[in-house]
Amino acid sequence: MKSMNFLLFVLLGILLLSCNEATISNENELQKEAGKKEAEYSYPMLTVLGTIQDAGSPQIGCTKDCCKDLLENPDPDRMVVSLGVVDTDGQYYIFEATPDYTRQNDLLRDMGNNQEIKTPSGIFLTYAHIGHYTGLMYLGKEAMDAGKVPVYAMPRMSEFLQNNGPWSLLSERNNIAINTLNENESVRFSNVKVTPILVPHRDELSETVGYRIEGPNKSALFIPDIDKWDKWGEDIIKEVAKVDYAFLDATFFSGEEINNRDISQIPHPFVIESMELFKHLDASEKSKIHFIHFNHTNPIINPKSKEAKQVLEAGFNIAKVYDIFAL
Ligand SMILES: [Zn+2]
Ligand SMILES: [Zn+2]
């Protein structure tokens, strides 16, 4: 009996030791991973924080194949369109304040080199449709009760935020500090420069802008919403030529995917139209283009779809959350 107890004791000891070793090696792995992550980033850098159209994916009320499984099995990468930038000094900037702002802020902070900084040093808004500014609510009294987070917006957008509740409470309480932008006038930070560019869109409550984001080495164009390329006074091909990466409106793949709405009332450049427009560009120009802002119906959200393969085979990119670009 005694020897039996001894055997059990030895077995238990071995078991405990091996558990302990497993924990230690896991911790080492985690540390290694964290070290690798830090080494991988060189600042300033830009990352994709969300790729989906304003209403998200799944979209409310959608029972079609695009959304039905996602209600039961949500895909954590399906966040509403947003880009993030981390500058050399640890300050970070977010483009758009989406309904997924809480997670996006956290993701970007994790990629930064200064964990003490908890809010962005700038939130740049494109316009007043629900996916692009309602995340500001998380800065208010019911949520973070933030202090003077700088929000950059065009004149009508700034007025809209200051004159309409609940957004006006954010300024009154100094949760946010609104900085009014002017078209084509840049805002400069340590090593990053941001310039708003007006684009034609359904401007019910505000004007609509895209942004040019420039670092010391590379630059990006971000136009998540525009009516059609030919309605714009600028030539998108020339604008793409000026930058290294272009994140462009890809709300709908084609007119086919929307059958219950009048698509002429929600104009966007279809992906097939953009691919046609850009088809004569050489491979390096095409590779700058990263399609973004996907409606829940857009088949290219699924990387395995034949449409996604068609886009990639044609030499274009499909933006993904966590994609990282040096600036
Ligand atoms: Zn949008
Ligand atoms: Zn759907």
Image (cartoon, rainbow, N blue to C red):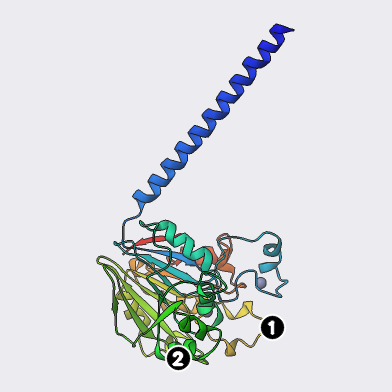
Indicate left or right for 313 with 86 as reference: right
Q: Secondary structure at mark 1?
A: loop
Q: Secondary structure at mark 2?
A: helix
Query: Residue 311 shows which numbered tag?
Result: none
- Residue 204 rendering spot, x and y as whole percentages: 52, 92
Badge 1 vs badge 2, beta-carbon distance below 8 Å: no
Indicate left or right for 133 with 8 as reference: left
Query: Residue 159 shows which numbered tag?
Result: 2
C-alpha gap between disc 1 and disc 2? 34 Å
- Residue 98 rendering spot, x and y as whole percentages: 52, 73
- Residue 191 rendering spot, x and y as whole percentages: 26, 67
Quarter of the image for residue 325 reads bottom left
In this orientation, does residue 319 appear? Answer: no
User: Which residue bears the numbered disc 1?
Assistant: 260
Q: Residues within 10 Å of mark 2 (few under 14, many from 20)?
A: some
Q: Residues within 10 Å of mark 1 (few under 14, many from 20)?
A: few
Indicate left or right for 265 with 158 as reference: right
Looking at the picture, tell me which residue is in the foreground, 138 or 219: 138
Indicate left or right for 45 with 128 as reference: left
Considering only vertical position in the picture, is 126 above or below 322? below
Q: Quadrant of the N terminus?
A: top right
- Residue 228 rendering spot, x and y as whole percentages: 47, 86
Looking at the picture, tell me which residue is in the foreground, 184 or 154: 154
Looking at the picture, tell me which residue is in the foreground, 26 or 46: 26
Residue at screen point 35% across, 87% down: 234
Residue at screen point 48% across, 61% down: 106
In this orientation, does residue 32 appear? Answer: yes
Q: Say which amino acid is labelled 1.
A: Asn
Quarter of the image for residue 276 reads bottom left
Depth-wise, is mark 1 or mark 2 nearer the camera?
2
Q: Say which amino acid is labelled 2.
A: Glu
Residue at screen point 56% across, 72% down: 99
